Image (spheres, rainbow, N blue to C red):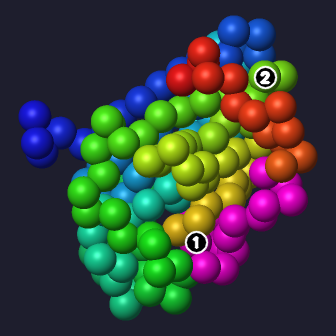
Amino acid sequence: MPNERPFLTVQHPFSLRWAILEDDGVGAWLYITEPDQPVPIADCLVYSCIEPVEAIPGEWDRKSPPPLTRDFASERAWQPDATSARIRLAWSSNGRGAVVVMDDEPVAFLTVGARRGCSKSIARSGRYGNSWDEALFESVFAEHADPASG
């Protein structure tokens, strides 16, 4: 269906943690969970489904993630045409990190032990996560993400 928003999950076979990508039509977020539990322990904005806003609206429901604001958005943040066919999730082989790959390019990742992940959609670190850190990405995914897991 053309209006269906991406929702992907993959569990690492040894750490038993879940990586979850949820696109709610406002933004797409990557989460990782406690081992074998649906409790997210870390998150990161992957992309914005809507054009970044000047400020979070005052009436925004605090139970859902906020829209991305322009002051945190990178040039590539707005992805209005994101589909599940363009995205995959993968784990590092040791289960210490999860990555979102979009159009064959890593765009966001989380590491176990960090509360916020890194994303190419984030221009500066803050409430949405951290800006991309290539050195950290290389150190966590040195063996490259396990293609069988995503």
Residue that badge 2 annotates:
93
Mark 2, Cα crowd under 10 Å, few <14 / some 14-19 / many 20+, is many
Q: Residue at x 42, y 30 (%)?
A: 8
Q: Nearer the viewer, residue 64 or 108?
A: 108
Q: Does residue 100 appear to the left or right of 144 in the view shown?
A: left
When the figure is inspected, residue 119 is found, relative to residue 141, above or below; the finding is below
Place residue 34 in its image quadrant: top right
Q: Position of residue 21 (x, y in %)?
A: 46, 39
Q: Nearer the viewer, residue 132 or 38?
A: 132
| Number of marks | 2
Q: Does residue 99 appear to the left or right of 50 in the view shown?
A: right
At label 2, the amino acid type is Ser
Q: Residue at x 47, y 47 (%)?
A: 102
Give the magenta range.
122-137
Q: Position of residue 131 (x, y in %)?
A: 68, 70
Residue that badge 1 annotates:
122
Q: Does residue 60 appear to the left or right of 134 in the view shown?
A: left
When the figure is inspected, residue 20 is found, relative to residue 38, above or below; the finding is below
Place residue 110 in its image quadrant: top right
* Dot 1: element: loop
Which one is earlier in the sequence, the residue at label 1 or at label 2?
2
Q: Residue at x 24, y 57 (%)?
A: 81
